[in-house]
Amino acid sequence: MADTTRITVTLPNDQVAELRKLTDNISGYVAEAVARQLRHQLLGAELMRYQEEHGEFTDEELIEAHTRIFGEADLGGSVGAA
């Protein structure tokens, strides 16, 4: 088991009610959500660093990345709008 620290988090009552419908392990659910958000922020920071060093991504690079992540479908619209 990973090392843990007990903290108190205050959430709106409606969110707690919805969480209880979804899981009996709210701590685990919240820990997973925090981990996902941290990965998202770290990836965003890394992408910004990369662009500062190598220039902005081209439309072709964005389309390729979108295709690798989501597949070929729905490339008709702007990638930025996804």
Image (cartoon, rainbow, N blue to C red):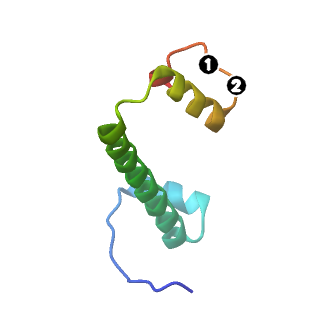
- Above or below — where is 82 with respect to 10? above
Q: Which residue lies furthest to the right in this view?
A: 72
Residue 17 in percent (x, y) is at 49, 58
Query: Which amino acid, by three-letter code, is at mark 1?
Result: Leu
Residue at 59% from the left image edge and 58% from the top image edge: 21
Q: Distance between the residues labelled 1 and 2?
A: 7 Å
Q: Which residue lies furthest to the front in this view?
A: 54
For the question of whether residue 43 can be seen, the reply is yes
- Above or below — where is 19 with respect to 73? below
Q: Mark 1 sits on what residue?
A: 75
Quick check: 66 left or right of 14? Answer: right
Residue at 37% from the left image edge and 43% from the top image edge: 50
Query: Which amino acid, by three-letter code, is at mark 2?
Result: Glu
Residue at 56% from the left image edge and 25% from the top image edge: 63
Residue 80 in percent (x, y) is at 45, 23
**Which quadrant is home to the N terminus?**
bottom right
At mark 1, the secondary structure is: loop
Residue 51 is drawn in which quadrant?
top left
At mark 2, the secondary structure is: loop
Q: Mark 2 sits on what residue?
A: 72
Q: How many labels does the image show?
A: 2
Q: Any mark on residue 31, and which?
A: none
Residue 67 in percent (x, y) is at 64, 30
Comparing 35 with 42, the one in front is 42
Quick check: 15 left or right of 55? Answer: right
